[in-house]
Image (cartoon, grey):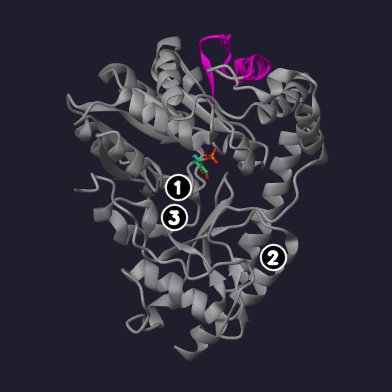
Amino acid sequence: MSYGTVKLDPRENKVNNLNDEMNNLTIVDLKVDYSDQDIADCLKSALVDASVSKDALMNEYAPYLGVPRFNSAIARFYSKLTNRTLDPKSEVLVTVGASEALFATFSALSSPGDEWILIEPFYAKYEPQIKIAGAIPRFTALKPANSNENGNANNWVLDRNEIRNFINNNTQGIVFNNPNNPLGKSFTDNELKFIAELAISHKLWIISDQAHEFTLDTMTPIASMPGMFERTITIGTASKSFGVPSWRIGWAYGPAEVIRRLTYVQAQIIRSPSTPPQLALAVALEDEICNFNSSDTYLARARAHIKRKRAIMIEACREAGMLPVEPRGGSCLIVSWPGLSGIDLSPVSGRDRGEKFTNWMLENVGINSVSFNIFYGENHKPLGDDYLRFCYNKNDETLRLAAKNLLLLKEYVNNS
Ligand SMILES: Cc1ncc(COP(=O)(O)O)c(C=O)c1O
């Protein structure tokens, strides 16, 4: 008997609960992008209304593509953003979060030995999902355009020659995450043009993961560029857009033939996503459509909220002597700490320097975080060793406690 090709991650999780105690410190958990804040009343009441509805279909499997009212709202909403009329009956699929949309896409579009280009840092599920689909990830890292410009995520750029050189007959496509999570970079129009030209000239698929799209003030969906709709699968999620990860609803839109194949894969795994949250989200999206471009919609308010949290976190890191890589979008912050060079990490447990740094932070500063190196392929992990990722979509009290703990770093600078 064997266990097949799935490899488990051996990293240990030292903290079980937010605000655990360790070494007399209250641990502040910034490791995972979990929010400790309540959701908007309008979303709650839309879900309650859907759940208590007398419509017997609310308790039935949803149609394979999704609840038609929701598909229609997604199509109408994204038609505005892509300047193209999306067909809700063939070009939009409701999924169990962006996670399952990604899984269905890699499964539907990969044959054994196919290659996908992954831009590092990348959302951690891409690599295992590609491998489960029998395909091969090829890694290319975003790097600061020059070494003293690493304090701004948008100065981290693509290695265009490396990407061009990766392309061969097995290349199936590029996984494009805009804004990039965890870096928070928002790709420029010039970078989008580069990716689009490459995709068109080499007949590549683009998987455009736009999970964090509404944290940006403006964003050009790559599918809206000339010649790109027919080769792009765009993925979004209510987890990030509406702050409701527990509802497990996401979506994919793209050319009808691809959506048909994603739908087939999805039907074999889960049949279709839960029905009531789809109806609740249809109501929320319809409101966005009615008030498109207003600064008083749920999405606009959520964007202002996350920007405020980001500013608090950046300020706290700077006060503590850390160097944040200022993001444009998303809800994570990458930081480095010059004082690290004076700290002896050899007695600290951990598989590599990055994990030792996070364990040192947990034990001495009371901040639970994750090493930036987990967002890189095996050979590129050292690129992330000296950075940590903090998730800051937390209530103000949690952020205040984080700021207080981070100040403990100052003791180590003076002593080193
Ligand atoms: C870039 C990115 N893609 C996909 C996902 C998965 O989201 P979901 O909760 O919709 O499965 C996340 C969640 O953090 C993400 O950050």
Q: Tell me whether circle 3 and circle 1 mark residues in contact (CB < 8 Å).
A: yes
Disc 3 or disc 2, which is closer to the eye? 2
In the visual, does 348 lie left or right of 270? Answer: left
Judging from the image, what secondary structure is the residue with disc 1 in?
A: helix
The front one of 54 and 321 is 54
Residue at 27 percent of width and 35 percent of height: 163
Q: Is residue 184 above or below residue 80?
A: below
Disc 2 on helix, strand or loop? helix
Q: Is residue 379 magenta?
A: no
Q: Three-letter amino acid code at disc 2? A: Thr
Residue at label 3? 149
Disc 3 packing (10 Å; few <14; some 14–19; many ≥20):
some
Earlier-in-chain disc, 1 versus 2: 1
- The amino acid marked with disc number 1 is Asn
Could you tell me residue 38's position as x and y percent?
A: 75, 50
Q: Quadrant of residue 297?
A: top right
**At 45% across and 47% down in the image, what residue appears?**
155
Q: Residue at x 51, y 10 (%)?
A: 90
| In the depicted structure, whether residue 36 falls above or below residue 22 | above
Residue that mark 1 sits on: 155
Q: According to the image, label 2 marks what residue?
A: 398
Ligand 1 under 8 Å from disc 1 Cβ: no
User: Over which residues does the magenta segment extend?
Assistant: 67-94
Between discs 3 and 1, the one toward the N terminus: 3
Tally of marks: 3
Q: Is residue 162 above or below residue 389?
A: above
Q: Nearer the viewer, residue 58 or 236?
A: 58
Closer to the eye: label 1 or 2:
2
